[in-house]
Every structure is written in structure tokens, then in C-alpha cells.
Amino acid sequence: DAKTTQPPSMDCAEGRAANLPCNHSTISGNEYVYWYRQIHSQGPQYIIHGLKNNETNEMASLIITEDRKSSTLILPHATLRDTAVYYCIVMDRGSTLGRLYFGRGTQLTVWP
Amino acid sequence: NAGVTQTPKFQVLKTGQSMTLQCAQDMNHNSMYWYRQDPGMGLRLIYYSASEGTTDKGEVPNGYNVSRLNKREFSLRLESAAPSQTSVYFCASSSPSGQPFYGYTFGSGTRLTVV
């Protein structure tokens, strides 16, 4: 049970912001939202995570709604190398050792 | 380079053969995981190990066994391979709860074909 819903695919022009939505309406109070991406045939790569505040790092920004039922991953200036499958995952860091349950994710295609 | 190393990268097996997929991490992580990924699908957890000496089943453990040899190494064994086990296998590691969390680190995968 992945607990999240994502659109199967999206596309974005190179240099523009890519905004990837995720619905996690059943998220519980101690569950974090994590984002990973998988570039073709490679192992998934950690991007960012958050609990309720917005977060930013060198790769992306994470916007979580006030009710925490949805979030958006923002790649501010998408490049061709950002073409990948993006996974949104909710996880309780305090239980089950942080096992990750992956859904099918969103295939982001960045075009020139 | 620090990270998770998987061997082999590619393998073809005949139905009924056995093999062991190896995984090693050099980040001093306590927890390690084995996932499989089928075409067009997300990753599914096979087994995981909270710490050296402990292992537990994930979503799809049937047909597999694991060994946490030491803190660094976590192997996955197929005793009698079946075509349904054709997949890409990923090993991952992470720091335990309560420790600074820097995400999961995945290996580059083992592409297994069972004919």
C-alpha cells in the first residue's frame, strides 16, 4: 500500500519549473513525505523530505499543504537530466525501520 | 566512493538454478533492504534487516532468503529460480531511526533473467 497518488506522467520544457503533485490524504501525524527519483535503469535517488514545513535543498523544493493531505515537488529550472520517474512516499520514521513503499510514480519528461 | 555496491550487475539463470546476489555498504548504516522492480512498476520490498543479525520479510518474500553477514553485507538468495523472478533487484541502506537522516542510498541494481 503506497498511500500516495501521483499522476502517471508529466512533461516540462527545459529551463521551466516542474511542479509534481502528490496526494496523501490518509497521512498520519507522524508520517513524513519523501521524494525520490529514478533515472532510467538506475537505483532510486533521494531528493528531499518534510513533515509539515516547506523544505528546500540544492535539488528541489517541497511544498506541503497546511492539512498535509497533499504536497508538490518543485524543480525550479528543469534540465534534460531531470527526466526520470519521481516517487512520492509517506513514511513514519519512528516505526518499521523506515521501510519505503513505492508506487508507480510520475514519469517526468523534460523536453528541449 | 562511499555507497552501496551490488554484484553481479547482470545474470541469466535457468529455471531451477540457484544464485546469491551480493550487497555491501560502506556508510556504517544499520538498516539494509532488498527490493525488486518489474517493468513499469514501482519497487517492492522483499526483505529487510534492521541491524546485524536480524532480518524480516517485506511485501514479496516468497522464493527468497537473505543473510545479514555482518554490518556491511546483506545477501539475497534464490534457491530455485523461476521465470517470475525475472526482475531488477536493488539493495539499499539507511541509518536507523533517531539518527540524522540523509535518505536511503540505493545500489545500481542487478538485472536478473530467468529462462
Image (cartoon, rainbow, N blue to C red):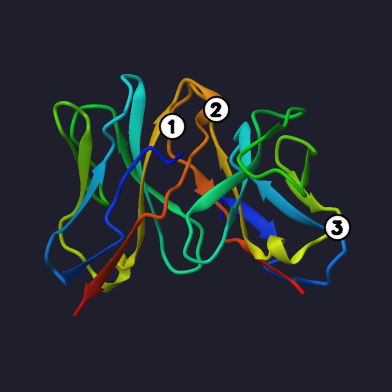
- Residue at screen point 77% across, 49% down: B63
Quadrant of the image for the C terminus of chain B?
Answer: bottom right
Q: Position of residue B100 (x, y in %)?
A: 44, 27
- Residue at screen point 87% across, 64% down: B16
Q: How dense is the environment of label 2, judged by Cα within 10 Å: few (below 14), some, or many (20 and up)?
A: many
Q: CA distance from mark 1 to mark 3?
A: 37 Å
- Residue at screen point 27% across, 73% down: A80
**Callout 1: helix, strand or loop?**
loop
Q: Are marks 2 and 1 in contact (CB under 8 Å)?
A: no
Chain under callout 1: B
Quadrant of the image for the N terminus of chain B?
Answer: bottom right
Q: Amino acid at mark 3?
A: Ser
Instruction: Tell me if A48 is positioned left or right of B13 in this view.
Output: left
Chain under callout 3: B
From what the image shows, is residue B64 above or below residue A67?
below
Residue indicated by mark 1: B101
Report the front residue among B26 and B52.
B52
Residue indicated by mark 2: A97
Q: Amino acid at mark 1?
A: Phe
Q: Amino acid at mark 2?
A: Leu
**Callout 3: helix, strand or loop?**
loop
- Residue at screen point 48% across, 41% down: A101
Instruction: Tell me if A95 is positioned left or right of A62 in this view.
Output: right
| Dot in front, 2 or 1 | 2
Chain under callout 2: A
Residue indicated by mark 3: B80
Q: Are marks 3 and 2 in contact (CB under 8 Å)?
A: no
Instruction: Tell me if A17 is positioned left or right of B77 in this view.
Output: left
